[in-house]
Image (cartoon, rainbow, N blue to C red):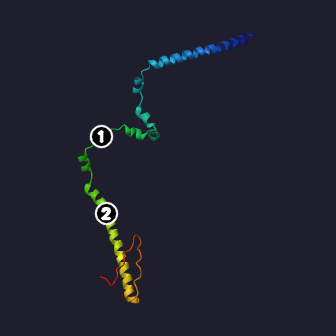
Amino acid sequence: MDPQDRKRAAGQRMAGPLDAIAQRGIAGAVGLFVESVDLNDIIRHVDLNAVLDRVDVDRLLQRVDVNALLARVDLDALLARVDVDALIERMDLPAVIARSSAGTVTETVDDVRDEARRLEGSADRWAEHLFHHDPDAAPPPAKDPPGGSAPAAEDPGQG
């Protein structure tokens, strides 16, 4: 057998056990290294702002269980810290009242306009009945305007 072939054969026989010894040695060395490293010392050298700039906040928030988070919040303690007087001072209370009243006023004006349209329709029907039709004929039935029903027509003989 050639001397080179003998070396190769011996190397192949030794490779398995030597590889296992090397792996155990490396694992042990890494373990000792990690145990001897002061993680706080390493973090002091890290620019955390640069790390946080790389964080995908939206993705992070998707993983947060908001209900579980809020369940941990002491709302009584949180509300006790609210300065209600300062909050009221920051509000433009007259503007808030005006905005809420404006909606009510607008609805009332719309209702008055609708009622005026209904009355105008009734007056038109009565005028047409009185001036253009047989005086003995009954007035035409009231038509409902858009958005509401017309009031019942009164008997012209009463009143």
Discs 1, 2 touching: Cβ within 8 Å: no
Three-letter code, disc 2: Thr
Three-letter code, disc 1: Asp
- Nearest to the observer: residue 95 or residue 73: 73
Q: Position of residue 132 (x, y in %)?
A: 40, 89
Q: Position of residue 82 (x, y in %)?
A: 27, 43
- Give whichever of discs 1 and 2 has the lower sequence position: 1
Q: Which residue, given by chain and number where applicable, does mark 1 sit on?
A: 76
Q: Is residue 70 above or below residue 39?
A: below
Corner quadrant of residue 35: top left
Name the residue rendered at 58%, 15% in the picture. 22
Corner quadrant of residue 157: bottom left
- Nearest to the observer: residue 96 or residue 131: 131
Label disc, if present, on residue 40 of the rendered structure: none
Q: Residues within 10 Å of mark 1 (few under 14, many from 20)?
A: few
Q: Which residue, given by chain and number where applicable, does mark 2 sit on?
A: 104
Q: Is residue 89 above or below residue 58?
A: below
SS of the residue at dot 2?
Answer: helix
Image quarter (top left, top right, bottom left or bottom right) of the N terminus? top right
